[in-house]
Amino acid sequence: MRRKADASRGAFFGFVRKEFRHILRDRRTLVVLFGMPVLMMGLFGYAIRNELENVRIGVAGATGDEVARRIIQRMDASSLFEVVEEVTGSDGIEDGFRHGRFNAAVIFEPGFAGALQRPGPAHVQVITDASNPNTASTVQAYVEAVLRGSGMEPALFQMRYNPELKSAYLFVPGVMAVILMLVSALMTSITITREREMGSMEVLLVSPLHPTQIIIGKVVPYLALSMINVATILLLAAFAFEVPIRGSLTLLVGEAFLFTLCALSLGILISSRSSSLQTSTMIALAGLLMPTVLLSGFIFPIASMPAPLQMLSHVVPAKWFLIIVRSIMIRGVGLELIWRETIIIAGMTLLFIGVSVRSFKLRLE
């Protein structure tokens, strides 16, 4: 009995040593195991910030008015605001918001300095882009504090695009980006790796299919399922959360199709470069979840992050898709204002597909 127990313990410890050797030989797993805690600490320490910085401000009515100029200079001197341009008329303000040149507009009434000397209030109107209600509320509070510090009464505020400050306007586009990226990439990231581990890759090796055909054949079913997710999200957005689709629905669906294809291509790339199912799953979850949530502008404004993280956000596909979705749904813009973001996502998709095909060929060899 004792000899049997010793043999059992020896087999167990042998199995444990084998697992340790397997993990230590897999450099990708080591990167995920030991790199992810460092990455999480860095992102959560620097990216999750509630305060705003460098809010872009457009100004109207301050030209030639000394008092208005002093107020604007005080705003610009703060790290909270950056006065980017002076506009004239409602058309200039609307154009600035639609093109995303500024997040808020401060409008002084004509003859503002003289109005301060007369009985009654001198009017200052502040318009904020409330497609992100958290940012809009914070901007409103900051501007009000600056005006009070200048000895003025609170201004007349107006929330553009989302006057009721519904949080659904913020999270519905973000949820669409997160779901499409994580689900699509996760589902496809395990396909090739699973074939390899199950031994069914040999069937593909002897088939007459080109690697590109194999990849496309694996992507198409997931692409169809992902578009069902898109339809579900849009239906819930419209009927459950009353989020408007002010732009073209056809354009929105087309952009969602492109982003889904990008996410699926990224999942295939992860799968083709991973040596095990466990590694590909961990990379898809850990390597895509945090950047998609933290560095896409889904929850936290990118402009408030440190410069290195702002640069890193440029390689996150979800960032560009969020700009597109919010522009179409909330602001009602067309392709002429989001073509740059569309080209970036299309370029990423082609890059992921090209590298995936090349990696797949190398794996077969």
Image (spheres, helix red, strand yellow):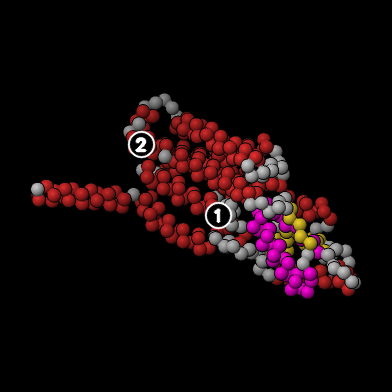
> Is residue 93 found left or right of 294 in the rendered image?
right
Q: Which mark is residue 271?
A: none
Q: Secondary structure at mark 2?
A: helix
Left or right of 136 on screen, residue 64? right
Position in image of residue 319 (x %, y %)? 59, 50
Q: Percent x, y for residue 322?
A: 61, 48
Q: Is residue 96 visible?
A: yes
Q: What residue does disc 2 label? A: 196
| Stretch of the chain drawn in magenta | 124-153
* Nearer to us in this view, 82 or 168: 168
- How far is mark 1 from mark 2, CA to CA? 33 Å
Looking at the picture, how far across and down is residue 11, in whole percent? 18, 48
Could you say which is closer to the camera, residue 16 or residue 153? Answer: 153
Q: Residue at x 67, y 37 (%)?
A: 249
Q: Which residue corresponds to mark 1?
A: 295
To which quarter of the image does residue 85 belong?
A: bottom right
Residue 145: in magenta span: yes
Q: Amino acid at mark 1?
A: Leu
Q: Position of residue 270 (x, y in %)?
A: 44, 43
Residues at marks 1 and 2 touching, judged by CB atoms closer than 8 Å: no
Describe residue 357's horizontal placement relative to residue 101 as left or right. left
Q: Is residue 175 magenta?
A: no
Name the element at disc 1: loop
- Dot 2, how many residues are within 10 Å of its Cα: few (below 14), some (14-19), or many (20+)? some
Amino acid tagged 2: Arg
